[in-house]
Image: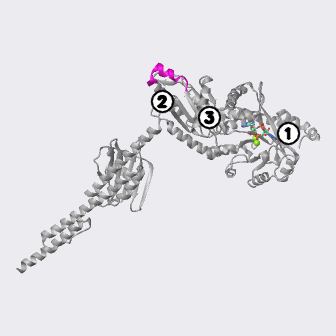
Amino acid sequence: MFCIRKLIRRTRRPLEELTEATHRVAAGDYHSRVTPTGDEELRGLAVAFNGMTEQIGRRFETLAVLSKLDRHILKSSELEEIVQAVLKHARDMLPCELLAVLVFDENCADVARLHVARYAEEVITCETRVEVPAALGSLLDTCEPIVELQAGDAAFESVRDLISDWRADRRFGVLPIRTDKGVQGAVAIAYSTPNASDRASLDFALGLAERLAVAISNADRRHALVRQAHYDGLTGLPNRVLFKDRLAQRIAHGQRSRKQFALLFIDLDRFKNINDSFGHTSGDELLKGVAARFAEELSEMDTIARLGGDEFTIITSDIDSAADAANAAQTVLSALARPVLLGDIEHFVSASIGIAVYPQDGVTTDILLRNADIAMYRAKAAGAGRFAYYEEAMNREAMERVELESELRQALARDELSVVYQPRIDLRTGAIIGVEALSRWHHPRFGMVPPGRFIRVAEDSGLIIAIGDRVLREICSRYHYWRRAGIEVRRLAYNVSVRQLQAPGFTKTLREIVERTRIPRGVLEIEITESVLATDIDYLTAVLEELSAMGVKVAIDDFGTGYSSLSYLRSLPIDALKIDKSFLPPPGERTSAALCEAIIAMSRALNVVPIAEGVESPEQAAFLLANGCEIAQGFYFSRPVSAEDIVRRYGREAYSEELGRGAVG
Ligand code: C2E
Ligand code: MG
Ligand code: MG
């Protein structure tokens, strides 16, 4: 009897404990455990209960974490955010030390974006472009939903390399992320403890890979929709919707920067004929060919779009003046100069282009577009293969520019260009110490064309290179001529444009001419404006240093009118600053000119020679000398004159005679 009661007590207590624990589990407490007591069967039951509770607990936790991720996927449209959430929450369920997610590039599976969470250091990193190792790529194509890699496997080293994880005891679990398009990425789990690869963890990892696959598919679908809505299906160029959006952005930028830009409206000439004679498929091919040509040859333009049919639009980058838009239009016309090949037939395509300039021709997208369209019809009416501005006055100017360019081309052949020289004077002695060479163009019909009008055209057309070389040859040949006449020209200065500096071979030609004409070191000087500083500064530094090593001096022309940063004065080999005439006190007045004084003081402090230009009165000359500027040019001393006139004025016999008449200094 005693024995039975004892037996019942020994059995009842563990059973009661089990019942209570079962209730707790039912209420959601999966941490509930029972102490294995009683006889062997009861202890076995307790152990089995604990094991089951733990399993159920982990399952629920897994489901909770995965459903949290599901909510993210439903809520967020950004793949990046979802990957970040996966990396953040995965740690709750995966006893790993490092987790990596690799997402292949949409267009190329050889490159990918790599996110890595290093849990010990609590950092998550992202590399936007890594190369996918070949061994890993081929493993992913064929492997099971999950593989475990160990030292010795072909893909093992590549995964280690990729995520820079070099621990000796490392193992990796790798899961391909498969969507209906194939493998689009991978998850890599790094761990050193063997229990990290238990069934529950593996199931969880599979759940992660599946969710990432869903997120990637969603992102793909969204990209496809965005592309469809914003790009033209035939040519791949931005469509009307995106174009208008970009135009609106450009207008907003223009409002802030106060810069101009042009809108080009392009309509192919006689495109209907192609459709009618060769069929619509050929028409489509031609449009594709034209779009490809534009994309290839007009890459410096901001946006090239297809509005529909045979209509394209281009938004140019910033332009300095409305006239610059003509260059853009000319570039479009020359892009079409070569025929477009359809099958084996060459088609010559031309286009009519209308130009509207922001802000003068409109400050809203609709008005700019309408005016560019109107201008396009004007161009069409004038004959195929032309461009026209919306504003009539601009058309005249553009015509003149085109005419000027072709005349300038001939001017070189007809030898209409010449060089005049403006003396540089030492203000202390009144003696000539150098000259600045300035180009002149005597046109048989137009008369004297000032450099202000033709240098820009020469720069835009590239003719400046030939003009610059001629000027240099001419002035170098004059050096010895003046020396023989007893004039000590210590400095031969000539103006050099950005286009010349950028031209390959600029320094080589200069060196050849200087050597051939035996100009001593330190005599030749190039004058460049501050606008050159807006170009590639490394390239500019290299060119100027090469010149400096050749003994060529460098002066900054029109100093103070352009660039705002002055740091280049220290870093570039600059020898002189030419103070722009706008900084001088007005001729005839003895007022102070604070900026002029400051420029002189600054150049002296930087060991750069200040040279004043545009001096027109004795008061200005006196002011400069009093403030420490000893070299000057200007009408007060002499206008630019011919090489012969320099000899007449400053040559041995003539010099004293001229001085006597008070014409010099
Ligand atoms: P710049 O190099 O600053 O030349 C000074 C300009 O001011 C010259 O005009 C000169 O005739 C004028 N000038 C000189 N003294 C006075 C004065 O006392 N008062 C006034 N009001 N003006 C004065 P120009 O010859 O018409 O040349 C204009 C610009 O054209 C030059 O400015 C230079 O930037 C450019 N240029 C001229 N020839 C060439 C060339 O061969 N190549 C290049 N790249 N540019 C050139
Ligand atoms: Mg100059
Ligand atoms: Mg100047």
Mark 3 within 8 Å of ligand 1, using the beta carbon: no
Q: Which mark is residue 209?
A: none
Q: Amino acid at mark 1?
A: Ser
Q: Which residue is mark 3?
A: 356
Residue at the spot x=77%, y=24% of the render? 445
The residue type indicated by label 2 comes to Lys
Residue neighbourhood size for the residue with mark 3, other residues' Cα within 10 Å, grouped as few (<14), some (14–19), many (≥20): many
Q: Residue 511, how many percent across, how many down? A: 69, 38
Vertical placement of residue 68 versus 182, above or below: below
Give whichever of discs 1 and 2 has the lower sequence position: 2
The type of residue carrying mark 3 is Ala
Question: Which comes sooner in the sequence, label 3 or label 1?
Answer: 3
Q: Answer left or right for 282 relative to 269.
A: left
Q: Secondary structure at mark 3?
A: strand
Q: Which quarter shows the N terminus?
A: bottom left
Image quadrant occupied by the C terminus: top right
User: Which contiguous range is marked in magenta?
Assistant: 268-282
Mark 2–mark 3 Cα distance, whole angstroms, equals: 25 Å
Helix, strand or loop under label 2 = helix
Residue 428 shows in this picture: no
Which numbered circle lies on residue 288? 2
Query: Residue 121 magenta-drawn?
Result: no
Q: Is mark 2 within 8 Å of ligand 1?
A: no
Q: Residues within 10 Å of mark 2 (few under 14, many from 20)?
A: some
Q: Nearer the viewer, residue 107 or 542?
A: 107
Instruction: Please name the residue that numbered disc 1 is placed on.
Output: 638
> For ligand 2, which image quadrant applies?
top right
